[in-house]
Image: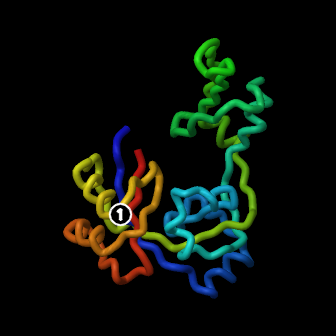
Amino acid sequence: MGLDQYAIAVRRISDTKRNEINNNHPDLTNDCNYLFLTKNELDDSRYTDLMPFLTQVRASHQITDIEQMKKDFGVPADAQCVGRAFTGTRLIDHYYDADYKNNHKEYKVDIDVLALEDKYTKVVTEDMWICLRRIIGQWRKDYDFDDAMQEAYGYCLENCGYALCNSDMIDLMKGDLKDDPSNYDAVFYHIWF
């Protein structure tokens, strides 16, 4: 665990690329050249700055069938999916009283990665919002750098959020970037921890 930080350069996709994707519905799950959002993610404040650079297409991506997992393992429908990792997924069901203090109990089910891939992963085709992306800078656990970036941004960036870089943020990154930011439509500061 820890803070992972990235400078992600983006470009809008061309009309030709949009038409190609709409005609073929490629699976974009593991294609590192694209950053994509699904309809359910459009209103998430972490992605607000990205919206002007995204183009709507009809494409495919992989999803984990959480509802089927809940049914198969007898986990209540309102259970939370805590996380998917290289070793599997954990479903946890939390029970609280009205005050969220007493009578807390937890039910855990660990599902191995083979079951995830074979039984609970499916490809869906739906409307998505995408842009081309390239990681042009990367830092690890550089908390002072993160503080400076967030101060230059003007407010606190949420975990997994994308902040559109202003000139002050670009200046803070300059010596560490693998490519010239002016070659792209925009550069974003992205954090994950």
* Residue in the picture at 41% in, 54% down: 157
Helix, strand or loop at label 1? It is helix
Count of marks overlaid on the render: 1
Colour approach in the figure: rainbow
Image coords of residue 98 (percent x, y): 68, 21
Farthest front residue in view: 99
Q: Please give left or right for residue 118 compared with residue 148 in the image.
A: right
Quarter location, residue 19: bottom right
> Which of the two residues, 167 or 54, is positioned nearer the viewer here?
167
The residue lying toward the viewer, choosing from 164 and 190, is 164
- Badge 1, how many Cα within 10 Å: few under 14, some, many 20+? some
Rendered-image quadrant of the C terminus: top left
| Viewer-closest of 102 and 6 | 102
Residue position marked by numbered label 1 in the rendering: 153
Up/down of 129 relative to 97, above or below: below
Name the kind of residue labelled 1 in the image.
Tyr
User: Which residue reaches farthest top?
Assistant: 103
**Residue at image point 69% right, 61% down:** 39
60 vs 24: above or below: above
Task: Report whether 3 appears left or right of 18.
Answer: left
Q: Quadrant of residue 91?
A: top right
Left or right of 54, for residue 62: right
| Image coords of residue 88 (percent x, y) | 57, 34
Residue 184 in which image quadrant: bottom left
Residue 158 image point, x, y percent: 45, 51
* Residue pictured at 67% horizontal, 54% vertical: 62
The residue positioned 65% from the left and 63% from the top of the image is 27
